[in-house]
Structures are given as C-alpha cells and as structure tokens.
Amino acid sequence: MAKKAAGLNPEQLLERAKERFDADDYYGCIHLLDELIESGRAFADAHHLRGLAYFMLGQPQRALESLDRALEENPRYLEALIHRAIVLGSMGRSEEAEETFARARAIGSATIAGIPAHYAAKLANQHAALGEAYAEAGAVDRAIEQYRAALELGPAFHDLRYRLARLLLDAGRALEAREELERVAAARPGAAEVKAALGLACYLSGDALTARRLWEELRRDRPDDVRIRAYLAMLDRAPEG
C-alpha cells in the first residue's frame, strides 16, 4: 500500500501529482490526486489531471468521469472541455465529441471582465492558489479577498465558491457564508458536503430550524454519516431559544 503524502497542503499535493504525471508515473499521480480528493479540498484542476492520467493509462471511461467532475466544478474549464472531446473521440462517440469541441470554441471566444475567458479562468485559479497560501499561513481575511477576486473572474466556479464559504465560516462570518453556500447549493442540489455546510452556516447565523431541516434531509439520504448525527445531537442539546 502506498504511503500518504503526510503534511502536504492541497497545492503541494497537486504540484507533486503534476510531477508524477510529467515523469510518466500515472499511477503515482492518481494516488496523490485520490488523496487530495478524499480530503474534500480538491479543485477542478485535480479532477482534470486525474482524467488525463487515466486516459494515458488507457482507461477512457474513468478519464471521462474525472473530466466530467472537473466540468461540474468549473463548467468553463477550457482544457477540460478539449480533453473531454478527445476522450470521447477515442471512444468512438464522435457526435458528443464535436458538441464538446463546440462548447470549447464558444468559451474560447468569450470574455469576462474584459479578459478572454480562457485567461480569466487561469487568473481565477491563480487567485485561488494565492488564497490557499494565505489560508495556510493563517491569514484568513486575506485568503477570503483572494477567493472573492477569483470569483469575479470565475463566477460559475462552484468549487471556489464552496471554499470561500468554508473560509467565511472559519472567520466567523456565518451570514456571508450562508449566502455563498445557497448559491452553490442551487447549482449543485445533490452535493451532500454543500448541504451539510449550509446547515452549519444557518445554525451559526441563528436559523436552527433551517439547519435542522437540511440535516434531517441528509440523515435520510446518509443514515450512517456520523457527522450529520453529531450535528443533530448538537441541536437536540441546545437550550431552547
């Protein structure tokens, strides 16, 4: 069994995975990315790279699943769209491949805040990476600023908005976190992590009824989730308001 890359933050894990990919160690790359994804702090870049590694290993179906996950997190991810089209083409799904190429061409010609969409997406990810560096250093307010800058350039990047919301919770800014999480939940209604965090933001902002509703819904879907049971137990023990 491979050892975990202990002590590495998400950016370091991703960089290490890129090094493994460049060295043609695709299994090692996937192992590091799996560790990052399991941590719950993976951005679209991790899913994209994982898709490429699976494709290089001759596993196009797994590659497609990872690329689709990257596009779920960031629907305007140009490279992920292009590589998705290539994977589909290799599977003989030429009509779907051409539709995906058409989406990529449309994004490539768009602009966001006066910046070509392709570059805006790259800049958004760079702001997010800087935000993570600030968060690792304990400068949460500066991290939040960087994530807000990222979302100005990538307003549909749900993974970045979710991370911003978690930072807002860490900073004690529950109402702001709730606003961001409600936007993510509207875009990704089936995401359990988002619903759990939204319940926490509601509870911390004084809305225990909504928190209970969200967590009860999650318990029905995930009866063995210890964290959800703990949240509901916390509500049950809370003094009557």
Image (cartoon, helix red, strand yellow):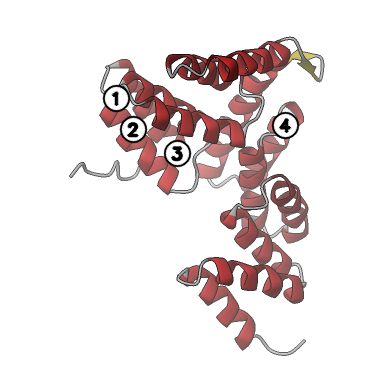
Check disc 2 and give the amino acid type.
Ile
In this orientation, which residue lies closer to the viewer: 38 or 106? 106
Q: Nearer the viewer, mark 2 or mark 4?
A: 2
| Residue 139: x %, y % from top left | 59, 44
Residue occupied by mark 1: 26
Q: Quadrant of the C terminus?
A: bottom right
Looking at the image, tell me whether mark 3 or mark 1 is earlier in sequence order: 3
Mark 2: secondary structure? helix
Cα distance between the residues tagged 1 and 2: 6 Å
Observer-nearest of 57 and 22: 57
Label 2 sits on residue:
30
For discs 4 and 1, the disc positioned in front in the rendered view: 1
Pick the front one: 2 or 108:
108
Question: Is disc 4 surrounded by few (<14), some (14 to 19) or many (20+) residues within 10 Å?
Answer: some
How far apart are the alpha carbons under marks 2 and 3? Answer: 14 Å
Q: Residue under circle 4?
A: 149
Report which quarter residue 129 is drawn in.
top right
Answer with mark 2 or mark 3, whichever residue precedes in sequence.
Answer: 3
Kind of residue indicated by mark 1: Tyr
Percent position of residue 31, x then y: 30, 37
Q: Position of residue 128 (x, y in %)?
A: 60, 33
Mark nearer the viewer, 2 or 3: 2
Q: Residue at x 36, y 26 (%)?
A: 54
Q: Kindly check if marks 1 and 2 are in contact, taking CB atoms under 8 A apart as contact.
A: yes
> Can residue 105 be seen in this snapshot?
yes
